[in-house]
Structure formats: C-alpha cells, structure tokens
Image: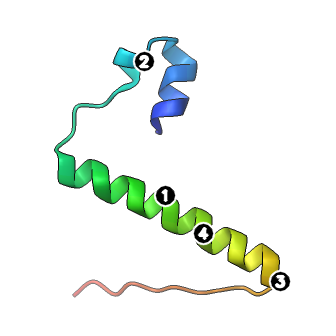
Amino acid sequence: MSKSALYELTGDELLAELPVPVPLDVTCHALCAQFTALSRVQQHTRTLLLYFVVHE
C-alpha cells in the first residue's frame, strides 16, 4: 500500500510513513516510477511492452 493510500486512510502523514530501510524505500519508488513511465509510453505509442524477470 502506498503512502498516499495510507494517508487517505489515517489522515496522519506521520502514521502513513512506513519505517523501512532507505535501499528498500528507494527501490519501491524506482519500481513505481518505472511502471508509470512504461504505462505512459504504452498509451502514447499504442504498443504493449512486455518485461519479464526470471529469478533463478
């Protein structure tokens, strides 16, 4: 759940902040930004972009 969603539920910005290590917080922001950017590119180009990650 995102900070904005937690803020909507609680109405308190401090309660909406999740205490996570900085690398995890940075990674979450990067993944959200990547999703947003790819979604906009897909809408603009009317093309479906597929991205697969294989974990071994």
Q: CA distance from mark 3 to mark 2?
A: 37 Å
Element on which disc 3 rests:
loop
Element on which disc 1 rests:
helix
Residue that badge 2 annotates: 13
Label 4 is placed on what type of residue?
A: Ala
Give the mark toward the camera: 4 or 3.
4
Disc 3, disc 2: CB below 8 Å?
no
Q: Is residue 25 above or below residue 7?
A: below
Element on which disc 2 rests:
helix
N-terminal of the pair, mark 4 or mark 2, is 2
Q: CA distance from mark 1 to mark 4?
A: 9 Å
N-terminal of the pair, mark 4 or mark 3, is 4
- Return the mark for residue 42: none
- Return the mark for residue 46: 3
Q: CA distance from mark 4 to mark 2?
A: 26 Å
In the image: residue 55, left or right of residue 33: left
Disc 4, disc 2: CB below 8 Å?
no
Foreground: 3 or 1? 3
Q: CA distance from mark 4 to mark 3?
A: 14 Å
Label 2 is placed on what type of residue?
A: Glu
N-terminal of the pair, mark 2 or mark 1, is 2
Give the mark toward the camera: 1 or 4.
4
Q: Residue at x 60, y 69 (%)?
A: 37
Mark 3 closeness class: few <14, some 14–19, many ≥20 residues within 10 Å: few
Residue that badge 4 annotates: 37
Furthest toward the left, the residue is 21
N-terminal of the pair, mark 3 or mark 2, is 2
Residue that badge 1 annotates: 32
Mark 2 closeness class: few <14, some 14–19, many ≥20 residues within 10 Å: few
